[in-house]
Each structure stands twice: as structure tokens, then as C-alpha cells.
Image (cartoon, rainbow, N blue to C red):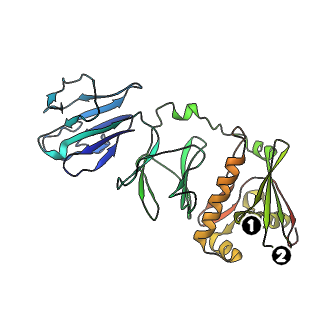
């Protein structure tokens, strides 16, 4: 994760594997507005071994005061000053030259960049999660209380305590070394099932995960009741003859009223349930969304389930 810091305003930027500096916004990741900066002034790239820079300007680029030869790639050292114009707004200090990786870069610089795991990244933390960033079907996704959306390079991921910039390094071997292969629609159903056991007074819900013929107890958790409530909604819709693609959808506000909690708390329970089940699943198994979202509604994903006990008929 290569980081440059601006000499004038101290702002930090994270470099993409190929990163252009210049005045043309459509061609450059970092836009410099100084009059002596060219449309595409200089480029920095990761060559899979080191970071290097090339000058493509009329007025020149210097590294530690030495002008770069035009058109020739030159290795960058940590701590170097890279200058692309006369003013300090065009001068950058090379802070870090670690290899690039898809990550979240804190806009305020208050914490270190967060390298992203493929399965889940709960923010601001796993104890009070507000959003989840994860990789699915070849795309990075952002899940929040209002739904799920794909993430594009440079998108902002916001929580109550911090804003992050999503830095995408999709031209590296990152995803190929950690593949999640999309499965056939019904393969996950054959591999994984959820077995709920609910106490008669509805105050305790335990969950067992059945995978590859083996049952693993996930114990009793508050978030299991959120899941079993979603399962019951889907079950009732199935009994009413509603088509599978339309079964189980419920407004987040209505689900919150059913559970007697705030919508933000329901969201936390959903994230916690995902965290527990993903960690319990064998890595090679298919992973349909545990809870699906669309326009303020949610439903239990495409997992077979059984419900035993409880005060409600099943």
C-alpha cells in the first residue's frame, strides 16, 4: 500500500497499481491544478517487485531534487520527495511503498489503512457493526442498513466514527489467489441448512448449522431470534403459495416492531449472525447471502431451515 503525503496540506493519498498525476481529471487518479503541471504529468506503477515513477511532462518531475529522464521508469525510495511543479501543492513525500492491496483508506488519516478480507469486514468494529464490506460473485459489495450496493474504486464508506475511501486493486493476483467461485443456484441448498430450536416462552433461540452431513451447534445467541423470525416470515409465505422469489420479504421497520427494537439494532444482529455463520462454514462451501436486502426490506437467504419449539405454530 503505497502512500504519498502532500507537502503543502499534509493530506495523504493511497496509490493504485497504476497511478497518474496531472491536471486532467478524466485520466488522473490525483488531480493537480497548478498551471505548470501537465495534463498527465507523471505516473507511478507497481511492477510486482517495486514502485517506480516515470515523467511524462513538459516541465519535468524531480525525485529528491534530481530531474527524471523523460519516459524512463525509475525506482522510488521511501522518504523521497517527488515534485511535479514549483509550488508545494505539487510536492509529495513517499511515506510507504508496500505492495498494493484492495483496502479501505481512512480519509482523516486517523488510523492505518484496513486491508480487506474476502468474506467480511465489519465497520467500525465487530461489536457495533454499521456496515459490512465483502467480496461476492466477482465484485466488492457494501452492505448497510438501507441495502446492498456494489463498490467502485474511490467510493466512500461511511460510519458514525470514520469515513473510508475504497481502494480497488483488481488488476493484481489478489482475487485469483483467494477465489470464491460462484456456484449453481441450488448447490448451496444441498450443502448448508439451519436448524433452530426456540424455547416455549420465545426468550431463547439456539441454532445448529448442518453442513456436509455434520451438525455444528452455534449455541444460543440473541441474533438467532432475528434469523428465526425471518425464517418464519418466509415459511408463512411458502404456506400461502407465494412464489419462491417473492417469499420472506419484510420491511426493516416492520421487523423492528416485531422484535421490539430499533432498526439499527436489527442491523447489528444481522451482521453478527453473518459473522458467526460465515466463520463456522467450511471455506469451500457455497455462500448464498444469509440475509438478502432490497429497498428497505430484508429476508432470510436461500438456506433450507427447520424450526422446533416456540410459542408460534411452525
Q: Position of residue 35 (x, y in %)?
A: 13, 44
Q: Is residue 92 above or below residue 173?
A: below
Q: Is residue 225 left or right of residue 77?
A: right
Q: Is residue 83 left or right of residue 290?
A: left
Instruction: From the viewer's side, name the closer residue of 98 and 180.
Output: 98
Residue 119 in view in this figure: yes
Q: Position of residue 116 (x, y in %)?
A: 51, 44
Secondary structure of the residue carrying numbered label 2: loop
Q: Tell me where residue 274 sits by quadrant.
A: bottom right
Q: Which residue is mark 1?
A: 225
Instruction: Determine the residue positioned at 82% across, 67% down.
Output: 236
Q: Position of residue 72 (x, y in %)?
A: 24, 22
- CA distance separating discs 2 and 1: 12 Å
Q: Is residue 293 above or below residue 62?
A: below
Instruction: Determine the residue positioned at 43% across, 52% down.
Output: 155
Q: Tell me where residue 51 sits by quadrant.
A: top left
Q: Is residue 265 above or below residue 179?
A: below
Q: Which residue is mark 2?
A: 201
Q: Earlier in the sequence, mark 2 or mark 1?
A: 2
Q: Position of residue 11 (x, y in %)?
A: 27, 50
Amino acid at each position: 500500500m503505497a502512500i504519498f503525503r502532500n507537502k503543502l496540506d499534509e493530506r495523504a493519498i493511497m496509490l493504485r497499481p497504476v497511478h497518474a498525476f496531472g491536471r486532467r481529471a478524466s485520466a488522473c487518479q490525483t488531480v493537480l491544478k497548478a498551471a505548470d503541471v501537465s495534463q498527465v504529468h507523471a505516473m507511478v506503477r507497481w511492477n510486482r517487485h517495486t514502485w517506480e515513477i516515470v515523467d511524462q511532462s513538459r516541465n519535468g518531475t524531480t525525485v529528491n531534487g534530481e530531474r527524471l529522464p523523460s519516459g524512463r521508469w525509475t525506482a522510488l525510495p521511501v522518504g523521497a520527495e517527488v515534485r511535479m511543479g514549483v509550488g508545494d501543492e505539487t510536492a509529495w513525500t513517499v511515506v510507504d511503498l508496500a505492495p498494493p492491496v484492495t483496502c479501505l483508506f481512512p480519509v482523516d488519516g486517523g488510523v492505518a489503512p484496513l486491508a480487506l478480507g474476502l468474506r467480511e469486514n465489519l465497520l467500525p468494529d465487530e461489536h457495533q457493526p454499521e456496515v459490512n464490506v465483502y467480496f461476492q460473485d466477482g465484485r466488492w459489495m457494501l452492505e448497510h442498513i438501507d441495502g446492498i450496493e456494489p463498490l467502485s474504486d474511490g467510493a466512500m464508506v461511511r460510519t458514525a466514527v470514520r469515513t473510508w475511501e475504497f481502494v480497488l486493486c483488481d488488476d493484481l493476483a489478489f482475487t485469483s489467489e483467494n477465489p470464491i467461485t460462484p456456484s449453481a443456484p441450488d448447490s448451496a441448498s444441498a450443502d448448508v441448512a439451519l436448524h433452530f430450536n426456540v424455547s416455549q416462552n420465545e426468550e431463547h433461540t439456539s441454532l445448529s448449522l448442518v453442513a456436509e452431513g455434520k451438525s455444528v451447534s452455534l449455541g444460543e445467541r440473541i441474533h438467532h431470534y432475528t434469523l428465526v423470525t425471518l425464517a418464519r416470515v418466509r415459511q408463512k409465505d411458502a404456506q400461502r403459495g407465494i412464489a419462491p422469489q417473492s417469499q420472506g420479504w419484510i420491511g426493516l421497520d416492520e421487523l423492528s416492531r416485531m422484535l421490539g427494537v430499533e432498526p439499527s439494532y436489527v442491523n447489528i444482529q444481522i451482521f453478527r449472525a453473518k459473522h458467526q455463520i460465515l466463520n463456522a462454514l467450511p471455506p469451500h462451501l457455497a455462500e448464498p447471502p444469509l440475509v438478502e436486502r432490497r429497498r428497505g426490506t430484508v429476508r432470510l437467504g436461500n438456506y433450507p431451515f427447520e424450526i422446533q419449539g416456540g410459542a408460534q405454530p411452525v
